[in-house]
Each structure stands twice: as structure tokens, then as C-alpha cells.
Image (cartoon, grey):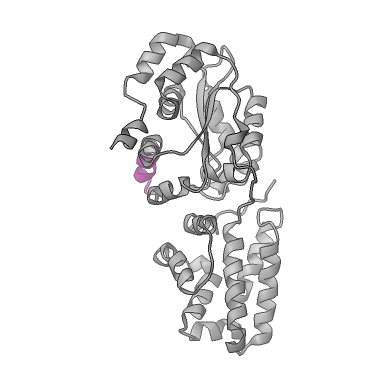
């Protein structure tokens, strides 16, 4: 139990004590967590630069690997809000996601007379649903994929900022940071040296479809149509599906399955596991949640290689593949 206790340098009185010691200097505080998908893609520096341009100065900053108990505390209000709204929080996958890369915790302050820095940061961050983000928001600019892989987390208000900062830095470090009121700098040595572009949901699905079409080619009777479908998949898979022709690309992925083509009829009539997956994945508008939850295991049973990030994109992407119809920046 020692690691759990050490992971929570927080008690319910920290906000009250820090408010009593620092008074009005607590009012312009905000807290931001650069999430693992952003860190893995090398976006930490760009996000921090954007915060500075918006007049938000880091007072304390550090690379963290949150303990699951810390995550429970961090996202407690989010889980309650989503449950009341009848939404499906992905808490069960959250600890797994946070194991894939570090995160960057940042205690920020706004201008000296600012009273709503945390609220301003919430607007700058943008909604968790990527379909609702807009130009100028962090989640739009840096291409949030879904509610799990959403680039950043931020506090709702100044008190939440103090509480969440104490969760990661401890009360003493937060106390010292507010007292100093000097800009903090991120240690570059703690960030992964080689950033990687993460694939999108559609790119991963297209890759699995291409692999299975290649494997099944000798067994498919409608070979000419299969080659045409494979070509369309390659074009979609090779491009950036968040670019301005996103909708055209995703329509190209699904077009052969919207009418009674010979290939669709052939795949639908076969009961081999590969054919079943192809038929299901080509008609994702009919996605069943139960199939979606087990799709990673199903693909591995079909000997399709998926790394940890591809698995995370797939698991967290169900329900969003048909929602994101915005054009990219």
C-alpha cells in the first residue's frame, strides 16, 4: 500500500490552506495535463508555447506517470458528470492508456488581475468530443481523436487547479511555486526523444482490411472487385484522414458496402473468421458495441499484428468513426 499512499500527496484541506496563505494569488491559477497521446507525438513544446502566447505562465511543471489512484481522483468529477448524462466513460481503459507514455503536469497562472484563467483555459482546450471542436482550440489544432485520446486535460476552476496540482506535485511544491511566481521550464531530457505520429482509427481499420484481403485473395471469387476495394483502401490508408478531404476518404472506405455488390454478397455468405471481420468492419455504421469491445482479441486471433497504440486507438475509437466529419486544420 505504500506506493498508493505515496502517489497521493493530497488531503482535502490543501486548497483551504493554500488559499489562506496566498489569497488573491490563487485566483488566476489553472492546471493542465498534457496527455500521453500528445506527449508521444512530440506536441508538449508546441502546447506550452501556445499557452504562453495566451498569457498563461507555467509556475510548476513536470513529467509524470500517474498512478491509477491518482487518475481516479483526477477524473472523479468527469466520471460523475458523464454517468449522469448517460454517456459511457472509458475509465476501465484509462490506466492502460496512461501506461503507454508519460504525461506533463503544469500549474499555470494568468494575468495578475485575472479571475478566470481556468475557465479561459477550458475554452482554449475545446470539448472532449472531437466532432464539436473548433479552429483555435487545442483539441482541434492537435487533432484529438476521441474522448480518451484527447490531447490535454484541464481543471474546471481555480480551486480544482490547486487540488489537481497538489495531486501531482504535492502541497509543498505548489506552495513554493505560488510564492516564487516565476516561470518554470520543462526538462527536455524527460520527454521521449523521438516523437511518433499516431495512426487514426480509419487508418488502422484500413490496414487490417488490406492485410486480410491480401491473405484471402486466392479464396475470393470476385477478384477484380477485391482489387478495386484494396486500391481504395490503400489510398485512404496512405493519406492523412484528418485532412480537408477526410469525408471523401471515409466515404471511399465504405462505398463498396452500401450496395449489393458481388464482393459484398460473397463476403457476407462466408462464415470464415476473416470474412466475418471484413464484412463487419466494412459496414462500421452498423458497429455493434459488443463486437467493438472484443475486436482487438478477434484481430489477434486472426494473426493481425497490433502494437499498444493501435490497440488503444481501436478500443477508444468505437462510436467516433462516424462522428468526426470536420475538416482538419
Which residue is depicted at the point 31% across and 32% down?
A: 5
**The N terminus - image quarter:** top left
Examine the rendered structure and indicate whether residue 74 appears above or below residue 145: above
Front residue of 158/10: it is 10
Which residue is depicted at the point 55% across and 16% down?
A: 114
- Most common secondary structure along the magenta stretch: helix
Q: Is residue 260 visible?
A: no
- The answer to whether 8 appears left or right of 110 in the picture is left
- The answer to whether 71 appears left or right of 319 in the picture is left
Q: Quadrant of residue 181?
A: top right
Q: Is residue 88 visible?
A: yes
Q: Quadrant of residue 44?
A: top right
Say whether residue 140 is magenta.
no
Front residue of 38/221: it is 38
Q: Which residues make up the magenta segment?
A: 78-86
The image shows residue 81 at horizontal and vertical percentages of 38, 40
Amino acid at each position: 500500500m505504500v506506493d498508493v499512499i505515496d502517489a497521493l500527496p493530497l488531503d482535502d484541506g490543501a486548497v483551504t490552506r493554500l488559499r489562506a496563505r496566498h489569497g488573491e494569488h490563487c485566483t488566476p491559477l489553472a492546471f493542465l495535463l498534457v496527455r500521453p497521446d500528445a506527449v508521444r507525438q512530440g506536441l508538449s513544446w508546441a502546447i506550452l508555447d501556445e499557452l504562453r502566447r495566451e498569457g498563461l505562465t507555467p509556475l510548476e511543471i513536470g513529467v509524470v506517470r500517474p498512478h491509477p489512484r491518482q487518475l481516479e481522483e483526477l477524473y472523479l468529477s468527469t466520471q460523475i458528470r458523464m454517468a449522469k448524462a448517460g454517456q459511457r466513460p472509458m475509465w476501465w481503459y484509462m490506466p492502460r492508456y496512461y501506461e503507454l507514455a508519460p504525461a506533463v503536469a503544469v500549474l499555470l497562472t494568468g494575468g495578475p488581475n485575472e479571475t478566470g484563467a481556468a475557465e479561459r483555459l477550458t475554452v482554449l482546450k475545446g470539448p472532449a468530443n472531437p466532432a464539436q471542436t473548433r479552429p483555435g482550440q487545442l483539441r482541434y489544432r492537435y487533432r484529438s481523436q476521441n474522448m480518451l485520446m484527447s490531447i490535454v486535460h484541464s481543471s474546471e476552476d481555480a480551486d480544482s487547479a490547486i487540488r489537481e496540482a497538489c495531486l501531482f506535485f504535492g502541497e509543498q511544491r505548489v506552495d513554493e511555486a505560488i510564492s516564487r511566481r516565476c516561470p518554470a521550464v520543462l526538462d527536455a531530457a524527460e520527454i521521449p526523444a523521438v516523437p511518433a505520429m499516431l495512426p487514426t482509427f480509419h487508418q488502422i481499420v484500413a490496414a487490417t482490411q488490406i492485410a486480410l484481403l491480401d491473405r484471402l485473395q486466392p479464396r475470393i471469387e470476385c477478384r477484380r472487385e477485391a482489387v478495386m476495394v484494396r486500391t481504395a483502401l490503400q489510398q485512404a490508408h496512405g493519406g492523412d484522414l484528418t485532412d480537408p478531404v477526410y469525408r471523401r476518404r471515409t466515404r471511399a472506405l465504405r462505398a463498396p458496402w452500401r450496395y449489393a455488390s458481388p464482393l459484398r454478397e460473397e463476403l457476407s455468405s462466408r462464415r470464415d473468421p476473416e470474412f466475418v471481420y471484413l464484412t463487419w468492419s466494412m459496414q462500421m455504421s452498423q458497429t455493434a458495441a459488443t463486437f467493438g469491445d472484443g475486436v482487438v482479441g478477434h484481430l489477434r486471433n486472426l494473426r493481425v499484428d497490433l502494437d499498444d497504440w493501435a490497440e488503444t486507438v481501436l478500443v477508444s475509437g468505437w462510436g467516433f468513426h462516424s462522428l468526426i466529419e470536420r475538416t482538419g486544420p
